[in-house]
Image: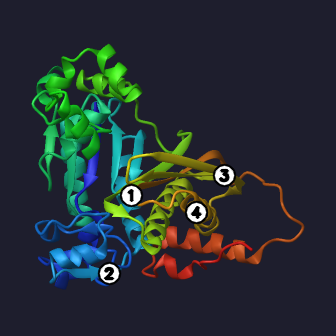
């Protein structure tokens, strides 16, 4: 069985935990009232006003004038994320992080020690509450995408178990928007041919769906029929580490786009170092408002430095913006071509002191979860 554990309002919950004066208030992490940046997280008090992650800060302030804006502290969130992962690894070595605040766990080999999957899920949820004073939602199912759907149904502190013989009855009544890969536009396309719920999709002809929608149609048909062959792959075994963000509204503000990309780089680099890898390739995914999607990648000297990788990704973003200046719906960052972090690399004649310093900063912040905002240590310079 597979668990999907999702920390509820992770960044905002950490701030409310550490700052008692914020408890019960609508807290917005990231963004600002004057429109700079996008929301990274919103407390449940803020969500009642319609505030969501990836929303421009200015829009969040309009929805809730009394919202309390807090600067992001990725080093602190990463430190707590490591504590959460340590709890996961106490129950199984098969942990696949999706981001700092969610992961898949395969507990099939752990049940002789800790009880069945539901018992393990309860223990993990309770240990997170006891040790970290934070709340997590847990979905349990034999398939990854079903576990992820289940974890989202009863937030916060949700707990949903879907047995193997209950997968189809669980999926059938759900709206098609619950399926991975079905966004607003995809939902509208499916609704035009009479598909409202997963059951409607399940009984469609796979051939017809593929004819209409290509590989996306086949992908949806398989999910609707409870077919998901993907296994839980820990980061140290993965061939690629990536993260992406869909914006609440289409963006063309350069500072907001850079801010969003920087946050994504922070997250993938933390996962890269946690897996003890360096990366030799960076990629940028870029989806326009009309859903045209572009990807660009670049070979780079093997590194695990946030600053070095950020420099390359920002250059890819600048290149993309010069060619495709339209409003942006989604951006994603990926790393690949891994090497062990301790593997000797081809060295220049002279060591780069700035690179060594930044490497040490990354490692110290990873280990200590410093309150210092990592962004302040990055020099925003373009290569000549």
Give the distance between the C-alpha atoms of the residues marked 3 and 2, in whole angstroms: 32 Å
Up/down of 95 relative to 222, above or below:
below
Label 2, label 1: how many angstroms apart (C-alpha)? 22 Å
Q: Is the C terminus in the top left, top right, bottom left or bottom right quadrant? A: bottom right
Q: Nearer the viewer, mark 2 or mark 1?
A: 2
* Residue density around tag 4, few if under 14, some if 14–19, many if 20 or more, within 10 Å: few
> How many C-alpha atoms fall within 10 Å of the one at disc 3: few (<14), some, or many (≥20)?
few
Distance, label 1 to label 4, CA atoms, is 31 Å
Where is mark 3, residue-wise? 298
Give residue 320's quadrant in the image.
bottom right
Mark 2 or mark 1: whose residue is earlier in sequence: 2
Give the quadrant of the N terminus: top left
Tags 3 and 4 touching, CB below 8 Å: no
**Residue found 61% across the figure and 79% down from its top:** 379
Marked residue nearer the N-terminal end (3 or 2): 2
**Is residue 213 toward the left or the right of residue 67 in the image?**
right
Dot 1 falls on a residue whose secondary structure is loop
Q: Which residue is mark 1?
A: 100
Please state if 293 lies on the left or on the right of 120 as rendered: right
Q: Quadrant of residue 146?
A: top left
Q: Which mark is residue 32?
A: 2
Q: Which residue is mark 4?
A: 322
Residue at x 19% of width, y 78% of height? 62
Secondary structure of the residue carrying tag 2 is loop
Local secondary structure at mark 4: helix
Indicate whether 112 appears above or below 269: above
Asked whether the residues under the numbered discs 3 and 1 touch, taking CB atoms below 8 Å apart as contact, a structural biologist would say no
Q: Earlier in the sequence, mark 4 or mark 2?
A: 2
Residue 132, how many percent across, how many down?
27, 65
Residue 183 visible somewhere in the drawing: no
Look at the numbered disc 3 and give the secondary structure of its residue. strand
């Amino acid at each position: 069985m597979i668990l999907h554990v999702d920390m509820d309002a992770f960044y905002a919950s950490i701030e409310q935990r550490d700052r008692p004066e914020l408890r019960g208030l609508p807290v917005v992490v990231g963004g600002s009232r004057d429109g700079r940046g996008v929301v990274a997280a919103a407390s449940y008090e803020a969500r009642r006003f319609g505030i969501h992650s990836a929303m421009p800060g200015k829009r969040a302030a309009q929805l809730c004038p009394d919202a309390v804006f807090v600067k992001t502290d990725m080093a602190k969130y990463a430190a707590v994320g490591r504590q959460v992962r340590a709890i996961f690894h106490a129950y199984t070595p098969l942990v696949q992080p999706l981001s700092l605040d969610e992961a898949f766990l395969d507990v099939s080999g752990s049940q002789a020690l800790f009880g069945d999957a539901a018992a393990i899920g309860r223990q993990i949820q309770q240990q997170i509450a006891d040790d970290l004073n934070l709340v997590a939602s847990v979905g349990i199912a034999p398939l990854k995408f079903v576990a992820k759907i289940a974890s989202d149904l009863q937030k916060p502190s949700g707990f949903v178990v879907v047995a193997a013989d209950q997968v189809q009855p669980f999926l059938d009544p759900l709206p098609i928007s619950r399926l991975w890969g079905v966004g607003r536009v995809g939902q509208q396309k499916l609704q035009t041919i009479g598909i409202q719920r997963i059951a409607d999709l399940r009984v469609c002809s796979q051939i017809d769906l593929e004819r209409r929608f290509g590989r996306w149609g086949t992908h949806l048909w398989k999910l609707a029929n409870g077919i998901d062959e993907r296994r839980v792959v820990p980061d140290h075994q993965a061939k690629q580490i990536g993260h992406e963000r869909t914006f609440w509204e289409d963006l063309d503000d350069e500072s907001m786009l850079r801010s969003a990309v920087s946050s994504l780089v922070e997250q993938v680099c933390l996962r890269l170092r946690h897996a003890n890898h360096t990366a030799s390739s960076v990629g940028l995914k870029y989806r326009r408002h009309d859903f045209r999607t572009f990807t660009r990648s670049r070979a780079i000297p093997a590194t695990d430095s946030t600053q070095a990788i950020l420099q390359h990704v920002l250059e890819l973003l600048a290149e993309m913006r010069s060619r495709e200046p339209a409003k942006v719906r989604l951006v994603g960052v990926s790393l690949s071509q891994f090497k062990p972090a301790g593997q000797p690399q081809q060295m220049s004649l002279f060591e780069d002191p700035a690179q060594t310093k930044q490497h040490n900063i990354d490692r110290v912040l990873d280990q200590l979860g410093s309150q210092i905002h990592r962004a302040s240590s990055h020099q925003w310079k373009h290569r000549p």
